[in-house]
Image (cartoon, rainbow, N blue to C red):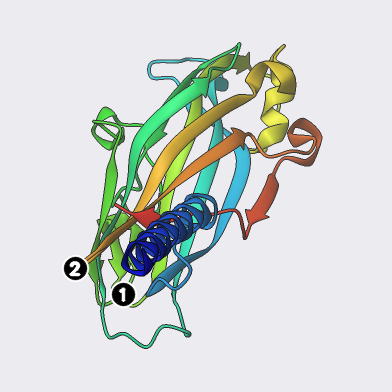
Amino acid sequence: MEERRKEKLKACIAIALIILAILIVGILSMKYSVEGEFNMPFILSKITVVSTAEGVENEGATEKWNLSLYQNNDVYFSIEKNEKNQKETMIESISIENIEITQKPKIGTVQVYMPNSLEGRLFSYAEEYIVSGNKLTYRGANKSNTKTLEIGNQGGTALIRFSNAKVGDYVSNEEEEMEHDGRLLSKTKATLEELNFKVTFDFVIHLKNASYVAPISLELPCQGNLIEKGTTSTEITDGFIFKRN
């Protein structure tokens, strides 16, 4: 009888330990799902978004001003070394993947552009600079250079443009000067509400032995009266939940 009691006690303890282990794993899994990685070698310290507009001259036009208007949103990603993580490693690449326009603007069509290497311009609307395959990759290098799609292997800055292309046209022979910013949008009948759109994508940091991915969602253009101010901007410094890819 005593032996049987001991066996039952051992079985109960074993079951209790198994349940405890399952609970711990479940809690840790839930915590990871909500909080993600807490000590990555590199961190996305902030996202800076700058919204404005630009007029692009239509070819063959005879008027003084014959412009197609683009509402542009330049998104800068700042990556820094995590000082709390002493592991020696470097960035092999970063990528902006699975780009999706989840809410389209009522006016215009969203195009995604990479920086280009043309002298004097950071972006060109040539077809060759449209991001294809819903993915843009920056290679790790000694220092960041957006025009060659390189990012510093110990941290740096990457850039991408979400442009609402051809939101309207402006033709005039009257005006002497033209401000190429958000105030151009006043030349069209478009309202800010009609220009709003949403984009989602995955931001991935690729290291030698690991990759970390965070889903990002942006509402563009930035809040504020772009038509009156010409330029609006915002900084996002938290809410990035990275997990091993």
Comparing 35 with 30, the one in front is 30
Residue 204, how many percent across, how many down?
34, 53
Comparing 186 with 165, the one in front is 165
Which residue is at 76% across, 31% downward?
A: 227
Q: Is residue 220 above or below residue 87?
A: above
Which residue is at 62% across, 34% downward?
A: 219
Residue extending furthest toward the left: 208
Residue 78, how many percent across, how many down?
48, 64
Is residue 164 rendered to the left or right of residue 154? right
Q: Is residue 184 above or below residue 45?
A: above
Quadrant for residue 232, please give it: top right
Q: Is residue 35 above or below residue 190?
A: below
Who comes first in sequence, dot 2 or dot 1? 1
Q: How many marks?
A: 2
Quadrant for residue 9, please give it: bottom left
Quadrant showing the N terminus: bottom left
Which class describes the residues within 10 Å of circle 2: few (<14), some (14-19), or many (20+)?
A: few
Is residue 231 rendered to the left or right of residue 34? right
Q: Which residue is mark 2?
A: 209
Residue 157, how many percent across, how many down?
42, 64
Q: Which residue is mark 1?
A: 143
Is residue 150 rendered to the left or right of residue 199? left
Comparing 85 with 206, the one in front is 85
* Amino acid beneath label 2: Asn
* Amino acid beneath label 1: Lys
Which class describes the residues within 10 Å of circle 1: few (<14), some (14-19), or many (20+)?
A: some
